[in-house]
Image (cartoon, rainbow, N blue to C red):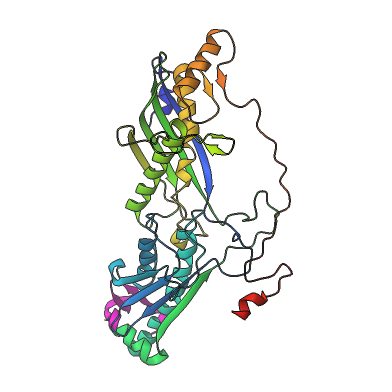
Amino acid sequence: ASGWREKFRQLPPGRGIGFAASAYLSGAGLPIYWNDMPHSGVVVKIDRGGGVAAFCGSIDIGQGSDSVLAYVVAEVLGVRPEDIRVVTADTDLTPVDLGSYSSRVTLMTGNAAKEAAEKLRGLLLDATAKKLEVSPSDLEARDRRVFLRDDPARGVAFDEAARLAEAAYGTLAAAGSYTPPKRAAKFKGAGVGPTPAYSYSACAVEVQVDRETGDVRVEHVWIAHDGGTAINPLLVEGQVEGSVYMGLGEVLMEEQVFRHGLHKIPSMLEYKSPTTLETPEITTLLVQTRDPEGPFGAKEAGQGPLLPVIPAVANAVYDAVGVRIDEVPITPEKILKALDQRAQGRPGRVGPERLPSVAFPEPIRVPPPWVDPEGRAATALHAR
């Protein structure tokens, strides 16, 4: 879509195109406080009028996780997303969820919701099968009905199936939970461990660089993201484009400078981020695969697409004016400094002389607040 192969090293002076690719986690393999509890829980209830409610501790902070919860439950039960009442982040009512971080909610909450809904679906099919005198395996739940797969006219409405199931099995409520699969191998890094799944992104960026001022203008961004199955494609596109916006801010504008412990860029007057005027045309490509760890094959889309934007811009600057800027933000001052070095016959490169070498220790196990360091239940908890 970007024409990168044809454009690279072929554009006019001052204009360049860069490419980069990346992978990103879909949730952490271990909670911050290590314990054996599930990472996410969901309770689904069906009333005798066919109403469905899903309860979960995760919170929607703008990424659209409430809609994912509704879509997953609706898909399993054969109803529509608007039929699902979503109740989230009420500590009096909802099961525990670890929180909206590490791009984990779609994969973990989605799997927990799918498990809970599948339990109820089994009860609906069993009760309907008895009424129709068929095997539950011959039935399907779809379009607000439960019906015979080979004879769709034979069936009942969803609300009738709910009444049949409640009459046979009692109150219709089921819980689902999700814990990431155990990984046998050791891992590097912090104590949150490996991830159940990875998303993949690729980005091409075309820029115009002014050799006199060092100013960089991003003309176009092409971003492709493999986030598994896009449960809500519109929201996924929004998440991907939001990541591009954040990446452009990091690579060209945003900087944190500390001196003697004080932040030298303390307000939005000095700390710049892109506006609509600096945001270029963005072409978004969703690469839909089916990850075996995700609910219906879905995985993260909220943070991963940010990663390739930064090196893609740096590569585009190099293609445009032949200098390497190895630290962010890529400011006009750094570009002019690198161009000056190159004019003097030195490598046109600005950035750290070397990267630090980090020796990763064994992961540190941090017990949760309700467990003492020896692994016993904390007495203070029981004393309350």
At which x and y percent is residue 84? 32, 71
- Farthest top residue in view: 344
In the displayed structure, 301 sits above or below 172; it is above
| Residue at the image point whose x is 49% and y is 45% from the top | 200
Tell me if residue 12 is in the magenta stretch.
no
Viewer-nearest residue: 133 or 244: 244
**Which region is colored magenta?**
134-159
At which x and y percent is residue 157? 27, 80
Whether residue 277 sits left or right of residue 112 in the image: it is: left
Whether residue 280 sits left or right of residue 18 in the image: it is: left
At which x and y percent is residue 336? 48, 16
In the displayed structure, 93 sits above or below 326; it is below
**Residue 382 picture quarter:** bottom right
Viewer-nearest residue: 328 or 270: 270
| Residue at the image point whose x is 40% and y is 21% from the top | 215
Res 319 seen here: yes
Which quarter shows the C terminus? Answer: bottom right
* Number of numbered markers: 0
**Residue 350 picture quarter:** top right
| Residue at the image point whose x is 48% and y is 30% from the top | 329
| Residue at the image point whose x is 53% and y is 47% from the top | 24
Viewer-nearest residue: 98 or 2: 98
